[in-house]
Every structure is written in C-alpha cells, then in structure tokens.
Amino acid sequence: MAPTTEHDQSARPSTLLITGGAGYIGSHTCVALQAAGYRLVVLDNFCNSQPETLDRVERISGQRLTAVHGDVRDRALLDRVLSEQAIAGVIHFAGLKAVGESSEKPLDYYENNVAGSVTLLQAMQAAGVKTLVFSSSATVYGMPQFLPYTEAHPLAPVNPYGRTKLMVEDMLRDLQQADAAWRIAILRYFNPVGAHPSGLIGEDPQGIPNNLMPFIAQVAGGRRAFLNIWGNDYDTPDGTGVRDYIHVDDLAAGHVAALQHLQRGAGSVTLNLGSGVGHSVLEVAQAFEAACGRPIARQFAPRRAGDLPAFWADSSLAQQVLGWRAASSLTQMCEDTWRFQRGLQTAS
Ligand code: NAD
Ligand code: UFG
C-alpha cells in the first residue's frame, strides 16, 4: 500500500465544527469524537459553560482542539471559521435549554435557538458544508398519545423551548426537501445525566439546578438541604414522575454513530436517543443513595407546572439504523454523577 502523504485528503481525519462544544453534552461528545479520530473546532460563547472545560476535554483525550470564542449568530465569524478550516460537518449543540426560563424570556429562546440556527445554516450553505447533526429533544412530542414515544409520535411541544426545537426541525426538513445534498441527523435526546468516568467533566449548572440529577447530587454533597419531589400523585407505579435517563457518554457515542452514518452517505435521519427504560424520581433518589452511600433527604411537594407524568423512548430505530444503543445502567449514571460532584466540591 502506498504511504499516505500530506496531500492524501482521503487519509486525513475530517475536521468538524462543534457549536456549544464546551457545554455539558458537547464536551462529552468532543471526547468521543476525538477518540474516533476527528479533529475539532469548537465554537462557544460560554454563556452557560467555562473555557476550562475544553482544557479538560484535551486532558482526557490527550489531543488538542481549536477553541473559538464566539456566537453562532455571528455570520461573519462563521464564514471565517468555515472558510479557514476544512470543515466536513457540523454538530450544533449551541442553544438555550431551560424550559421554565423559555416561558419567561421567549424572545431570547427564539433568537438564540431559531435565529442562531438560521445563521449557522446559511453560513454552512454558503460554504458548501451540508452535513449536520442537530440537538433536538423529546420535548418536541408533548403530551404522550402513546408510550414509548416513537419518532412517528405527533409533534406538539407545550413550551417555547420545545417550540424552538420543533421550528428548527421543520426548517431542516424543508432544507433537505429543497436540496438533497444536505445530510442531516436530528437527534431527539431524552434525559441526559451522568458524567465522564474521569470525573473531569460533567454537568455543573449555575444557581439552583432545575433538573433532577444535578439537584440530587447537590443534596448528596451537602450544598442543598433536601430534594423536593414534584408530585407523588401521578398515575405511575409509585406516584412520582417517570423519565428515560440516558448516560451522557452513551449520548456522545450516539453522535459519533450518527455522524459516521451521514458521512457514509446513508441518508438523513431523525432518531430518539434514550435508554428505552423509564425510572421514577424515587427510583433515581434510591439509586443515588446506593451510589454515594449517603441518605438523600427528600419531601413530597406539589406537581411542577408543565411537567408531564411519564415518558420514555422507543430507541429501536437508532439501534436499527446506527447499530447504537444506550448501555449504561442507572447505577452507573449515579456513580459517575457523584464522582464529578465530589470533584467539584474538592475544587471549591
Ligand atoms: P449546555 O448549556 O451545557 O450547552 C450549550 C452550550 O452552548 C454552552 O456551552 C453555551 O455556552 C453554548 N451556547 C449557547 N448559546 C450559544 C450561542 N448563541 N453561540 C455559541 N454558543 C452558545 O446544554 P447541554 O445540556 O449540553 O445541551 C446541548 C444541546 O442539547 C442544547 O441545544 C439543548 O437544547 C439540547 N438538549 C439538551 C437536553 C438536556 O437535558 N441537557 C435535552 C434535550 C436537548
Ligand atoms: N424533579 C423533581 N424534583 C426536582 C427536579 C425534578 O421531582 O428538583 C422531577 C420532575 O418533576 C420530573 C423528573 O424529576 O418528574 C425529571 O425532571 P427534570 O427537570 O430533570 O427533566 P424534565 O424531564 O422535566 O426535562 C428534561 C430537560 C428538558 C428536556 C426533557 C426531555 O430539562 O430540556 O428533559 O429531554 F426537554
């Protein structure tokens, strides 16, 4: 076999643009992509993350990445990045994600999530970069008409955040219709939790956590006195809300598989990424107690406005199309979250 040279394009690892790559899911996906041989350019405005996270990604992977401090709404910057680097595809994580806040500040969400995506897609189109993986959410389904949700479930989100995700999905479907050269993977995440087993990266929300797992982790670490369980009168086995928790490293692996699928030319896809199993709030609290060896003080409180009683994924299409499935147990998710939480507390 002829030796590969600097000029042998086919032998070069492809370079990807990762928007929002310093965030929770993005950082774990960067580690997985580097392990799979990709070179990365990360664009992040750090509105919900720290530049230091990218140093940690490099420490874990032992590989460098290019960090660009900037905003996906900055067209000139995108044009520059897309022309200076030989970008083969984009994974678009950047966006705002707090459901409650999206009802209070809807314009911020439409501006960042929808207008930001329009700007990114225009820049990609102009640069001829037409391979995209997009972070969507199970929240696009809305009130379950059947469970588990399949990708064919009607789409009827019940909050502004969910509507921004559906709008971008619709835009991507229209774009694909207009120009078949686009290769697009829309990934609908269920409830990502856990952290990298190194304990170096994980989810560290600013202020009071909205989401269950980071809240429980802070109770375990003594930063919060007790967990409020929002509702114990749902029509679920123990009365508390049921969700499909998926380890963030399984989710990261799903992105690598989706990207490889697109790069093989195997066609655009819309896929649920979940574990396929529902766990109640009480089950999560008990699993966390077992993982950290401490009691999780808790009390029942009224239902949280806007919460659905229960939902989980049918992820069989992702398994069929990508050969991917979530492998981690709830125990592993709790153990890895706890390791990261302890690291945070030692550092502070
Ligand atoms: P995150 O907030 O940790 O990461 C988002 C990153 O994007 C952050 O680093 C933030 O600084 C950056 N960012 C935000 N707006 C930007 C902009 N305009 N320009 C450049 N960078 C910007 O969130 P996450 O949990 O990692 O979520 C990643 C994506 O997945 C989001 O689009 C989110 O909506 C989606 N998603 C998340 C969940 C979840 O539960 N975590 C579930 C479903 C979908
Ligand atoms: N919960 C509590 N106490 C808390 C926090 C949560 O009891 O302090 C309960 C909720 O009522 C719910 C379950 O824990 O039953 C999970 O709640 P999360 O806030 O962790 O997650 P959600 O399912 O409400 O929403 C998350 C993301 C959304 C995303 C959705 C589906 O926040 O952005 O998963 O992917 F759309």
Image (cartoon, rainbow, N blue to C red):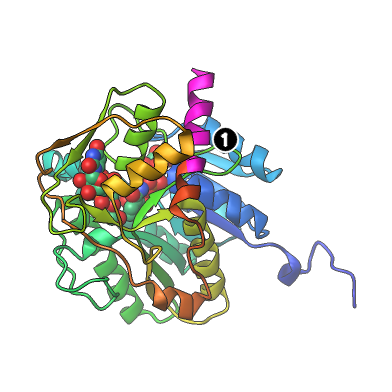
Q: Is residue 115 visible?
A: no
The reply to whether the magenta stretch includes residue 15 is no
- The magenta-colored residue range is 335-348
Front-most of residues 177 and 156: 156
Q: Residue at x 9, y 39 (%)?
A: 302
Q: Is residue 333 above or below residue 138?
A: above
Closest to the observer, 216 or 256: 216
331 and 339: which is toward the camera: 331
The structure residue drawn at horizontal position 45% and vertical position 48%, both measured from the top left corner, is 25
Please give the residue where the numbered disc 1 appears in the rendered image: 200
Callout 1 amino acid:
Leu
Query: Tag 1's secondary structure?
Result: loop
Majority secondary structure of the magenta segment? Answer: helix
* Pointer 1 residue Cβ closer than 8 Å to ligand 1: no
Residue 305 image point, x, y percent: 9, 45
- In the image, is residue 7 above or below residue 53? below
Residue 61 location, x and y as percent?
67, 45
Crowding around mark 1 (Cα neighbors within 10 Å: few <14, some 14 to 19, many 20+) is some
